[in-house]
Image (cartoon, rainbow, N blue to C red):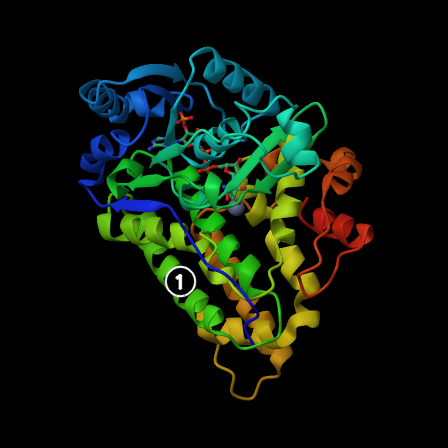
Amino acid sequence: MLGNFTYCNPTKIHFGPDALDSLGGELAKYGKNVLLVYGGGSIKKNGIYDSIIKILENSGKNVTELGGVMPNPTSDKLIEGVKVARENKIDFILAVGGGSVCDYSKAVSVSVNCNEDPWEKYFIRFEEPTCDIVPVGCVLTMVGTGSEMNGGSVITNHHQKLKIGHVFGEEVFPKFAVLNPEFTFSVPQYQMVSGIYDIMSHILEQYFSGEDDNTSDYIMEGMLRSLIHSADAAVKNPRDYEARSNIMWTATWALNTFVAMGKTTDWEVHMLGQAVAAHTDATHGMTLAAVSMPYYRLIMPYGLKKFARYAKAVWDVRPEGKSDGQIAAEGLDRMEAWMKSIGLVMNITELGANESMLDGIVKSTLIMEGGYKVLTRDDVRAILKASL
Ligand code: NZQ
Ligand code: ZN
């Protein structure tokens, strides 16, 4: 049964090979002083930077550049961005990059006009913005997080060894997102595959929760089948437009709040993955891949019906003559084999973790209550140990 909900997603999407043509019209709606935020330089190598600069110039904007946003953007970098935005009286933030750049831009947007420490306010106390928010628009170059159409912002604090996400309300969602699948062709294979698993994990975090039968479950099963099919094609040929465009659109819908409406969700895989990243700075999707199988095998008995349904609907496990336990286990085996086949990292050792870090990672793991089993600290340790 679906519970009560109000659904609104204010982000306008411009999708396709010509999507960037819409940027000038969007920029015209906002003030003159634009903060152009980007990462470590990939947009300068693949030409996206030049195209954007031309559009900004033609739109008559004063542009302040803020590059060097790192994967897993840090609280220190956030302070720097807030300072730059204040000094240049920024009216609009244009994020050009992946989830890190989009997340970071949102964090800056809610902090420019706020006098408190943003890390403490948003990522420790989880308060809502109480100041004017600088609007953000996004040109996406790497697919996975869904940040282009949601209010999520994940920031890492290396001093405190914490990586924490705040899910802001609709006033913080990007005003628009430009999604050109061709912009993702230059993403390295490791990143592409990591993004693909991030999408899968977002869907599974929302799917593996609750016992009821609702429309979202059927939508998510369809999205998963599309994702697996397109991922196989993209791994074979990264320039397969059909595959890359389907992956891009699935990523957006996987985490734009739509499939979560009226149902409970889990998010424990993300809490485990974020704790691993807080200690290793590893790539987001890979941290999720590395902890997923031990986690799902541990909770499977507590959500057996749903895991058996998943095995049949997504992995085509034939149920004849098998118990739910056998069907469910076979589904997870097929999932694991597929994960290996596309090149995902299946253990945290490969991501830089080791036995001596376990205590710290266990401590950094937040425990959620929406999954089939509320983990104990011993469970967390067992999952991480199984992933070493
Ligand atoms: O920095 P540059 O040089 O641009 O290189 C980036 C970066 O090294 C590269 N890249 C991006 N587009 C490229 C490209 N390289 C070549 N060609 C292109 N077109 O890819 C690398 C990774 O980029 P990043 O933005 O870090 O990846 P992703 O999109 O996976 O974002 C990860 C961050 O998003 C957070 C993660 O925790 C992590 O901090 N998440 C945000 C969520 C949200 N807003 O809802 C939810 C997610 O679960 C996730 O937690
Ligand atoms: Zn994620």
How far across and how far down the image is residue 163, in percent?
Answer: 64, 35
Question: Residue shown at 43%/45% (left/top)?
Answer: 144
The image quadrant that residue 64 belongs to is top left
The answer to whether any part of residue 263 appears in the image is yes
How far across and how far down the image is residue 22, in percent?
Answer: 21, 37
Report the side of 231 relative to 54 (left or right).
right
> In the picture shown, does residue 219 fall above or below 98?
below
How far across and how far down the image is residue 156, in percent?
Answer: 61, 30
Is the C terminus in the top left, top right, bottom left or bottom right quadrant? top right
Q: Which residue is nearer to you in this view: 129 or 149?
A: 129
Residue most extreme to the bottom: 321
Question: Residue shown at 63%/49% (left/top)?
Answer: 291
The answer to whether any part of residue 349 appears in the image is no
* Three-letter amino acid code at the position of disc 1: Met
> In the picture shown, does residue 352 fall above or below 259?
above
How far across and how far down the image is residue 108, in percent?
Answer: 51, 26
Question: Residue shown at 77%/54% (left/top)?
Answer: 379
Tell me: is circle 1 under 8 Å from ligand 2: no
Report the side of 379 relative to 186 (left or right).
right
Is the N terminus in the top left, top right, bottom left or bottom right quadrant? bottom right
Question: Residue shown at 54%/28% (left/top)?
Answer: 73
Q: Which residue is nearer to you in this view: 383 or 207?
A: 207
The residue where tag 1 is placed is 223
Report the side of 373 relative to 333 (left or right).
right
Give the class, few, some or many, for how many residues have Cα within 10 Å of label 1's Cα (few <14, many ≥20). many
Report the side of 6 relative to 372 (left or right).
left
Q: Which residue is nearer to you in this view: 340 or 160?
A: 160
Q: Give SS at disc 1.
A: helix
The image quadrant that residue 354 belongs to is top right
Q: Which residue is nearer to you in this view: 239 or 305?
A: 305
